Amino acid sequence: MSLLILVRHGEPGLKPEDRLAGWLDIPLSRKGIEEALECAVELENIELDFAFASNLIRTQETLFIILSGQKKTGVLVHERVDEEKNSEKTSEQTAWYSYPEKLGKELIPIYSTAALNERYYGKLQGRKKQKMEEKYGAEKLSCWRWDFEPGPPEGESLKAVYERAVPYFEQKSCLQ
């Protein structure tokens, strides 16, 4: 039986209750590292075959902590676009990576992509939540953050995030 395990990154270095992080590429806070360690303990008896991560450092840090709890080595899989097909506007990506074969089952390929990044907050990116509530109103801010549509000014709605993340996983379904 196959499992899909979804894990959100630990707390980022910005105080999450204070700011809208979005695509700000910030590392985990001390609490975020502790959260990742707790997650590693919860997942230690589940055999992972491969992993996906966004391009954001806090996500990758969380994943590497989880893998270390499993005594696994993560290797980023680099994808290249077939130039011939790309010219036809149908880019086929070929996954390739190189690793010492002696690692065997201890090696976990990690597919990293911006398609899995958090939502882009546009004009609200990195701003203090309290200031944005004062400027736009608590109800409007809550709507932008939690409703499927609309998104924040010049940012992404949850629908837009869905529309970029789901096709990525559908494309990768061949990894089963």
Image: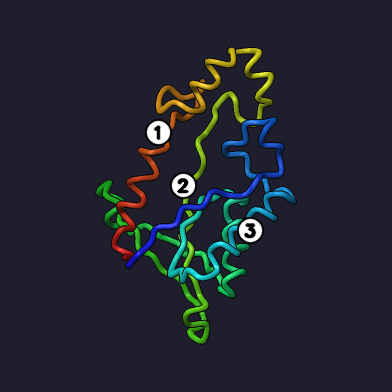
Q: Amino acid at mark 2?
A: Leu
Marks 1 and 2: in contact by CB < 8 Å?
A: no
Closer to the eye: label 2 or 3: 3
Q: Amino acid at mark 1?
A: Ala
Earlier in the chain: of badge 2 and badge 1, it is 2
Q: Image check: 53 left or right of 135? A: left
Question: Mark number for residue 110?
Answer: none
Residue 97 located left or right of residue 139: left
Screen quadrant of the N terminus = bottom left
Q: Position of residue 113 (x, y in %)?
A: 47, 52
Depicted 53 relative to depicted 117: above or below:
below
Residue annotated with mark 2? 116
Question: For numbered disc 1, what is the local secondary structure?
Answer: helix
Q: Which residue is mark 1?
A: 160
The residue depicted at 68 percent of the width and 19 percent of the height is 131
Q: What percent of the width, then of the height, locates residue 36?
A: 63, 56
Q: Tell me the kind of residue under disc 3.
A: Glu
Position of the C terminus, as image quadrant, is bottom left
* Residue 38, disc: 3
Label 1 or label 3, whichever comes before in sequence order = 3
- Nearest the viewer among 176 and 123 is 176
